[in-house]
Amino acid sequence: IPWNEIALETAREVEKEVMPLFGTPSAGETIGENVSGDVTKYVDKVAEDVVLGRLQPLGVNIVSEEIGFIDNGSDYTVIVDPIDGSYNFAAGIPIFAFSFAVFRKNRPVYGAIYEFVTRTFYEALPGGGAYMNGKPIKVRKPERGKEALSFYTRGRCLGLIRRVKRVRVLGAIAVELTYLAKGALDGVLDIRNYVRTTDIAAGVLIAREAGAIVADEGGKELELRLDATTKTNVIAVNDRYLLDIILEEL
Ligand code: IPD
Ligand code: CA
Ligand code: CA
């Protein structure tokens, strides 16, 4: 199955349907509640309908952020967030992306994130590296005292702010994980017990393939549950010492 083509074509179709709504009040209108208890905005629904229209004919299982798990009895499960960062989208902040990860049984097969505004396509080939627009990417080596972290803690772990140079909270964790992968951030942590697999599956695959360490709150390798409702914590960094600092501050 040519997952890369399916991912890119789906992302482009979502782009075509949603970009006219960027920054408009109607994009942000609440139209319901999703399976994980979060609101579904109008733009989320428009984007998800495109995704389902593309994936349903393939007969694969689908886990999508609004609708949840669709079991089609396949060995393949595609975990999608049609738009990660929908608050940003509706508010006219240009940081949001399409996130797409494929598993066969429980093993990762492929991951992709498409950042709409910059038109950047990130991919993970499990065991075969991470790519940005077809070119290999790697995490950077952090410089002590100059780290840049994305940081969602809901008031916990505030001592960490003093131990790094830059904090960037961008509002779309899928995008932030690609920034870690390409060497623009040194770490991404969300310890609110709030992110779902749909938010992070592709980002985790891409960051790992680019050399990141992706751990849970105990410092162990993060395991993804292939569902739409489990909430988790994630600590993704480009170097072990940063993980140690974060765990110390928890
Ligand atoms: C959100 C983004 C954001 C995270 C929120 C998520 P959504 O996803 O991933 O980074 O902080 O917790 O809800 O709802 O915009 O797809
Ligand atoms: Ca999301
Ligand atoms: Ca979403």
Image (cartoon, rainbow, N blue to C red):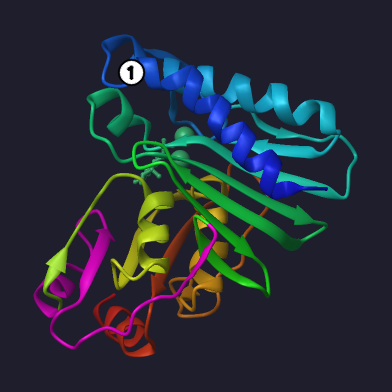
Q: In which quarter of the image is ligand 2?
A: top left
Q: Give the range drawn in magenta.
A: 134-163
Placement of 74 over or under 220, stated as above or below:
above
Residue 73 visible to the viewer:
yes
Give the secondary structure at mark 1.
helix
Query: In x, y percent, where is residue 179?
Result: 35, 61
Q: Does the magenta-highlighted stretch encompass residue 137?
A: yes
Q: Mark 1 belongs to which amino acid?
A: Gly
Residue situated in front as seen by the camera: 68 or 80: 80
Under 8 Å from ligand 1: the CB of mark 1? no
Quadrant in which the C terminus appears: bottom left
Q: Does the magenta-highlighted stretch encompass residue 248?
A: no
Placement of 155 over or under 242, stated as above or below:
above
Report which residue position mark 1 lands on: 28
Please report the residue visible at 40 percent of the width from the left and 69 percent of the height from the top.
235
Please report the residue visible at 62 percent of the width from the left and 55 percent of the height from the top.
111
Query: In x, y percent, where is residue 10?
Result: 62, 32
Query: In x, y percent, where is residue 161?
Result: 13, 70
Query: Which quadrant holds residue 198?
Result: top right
Dot 1 crowding, Cα within 10 Å, few <14, some 14–19, many 20+? many
Q: Is residue 243 left or right of residue 94?
A: right
Placement of 245 over or under 39, stated as above or below:
below
Query: Which quadrant holds residue 6?
Result: top right
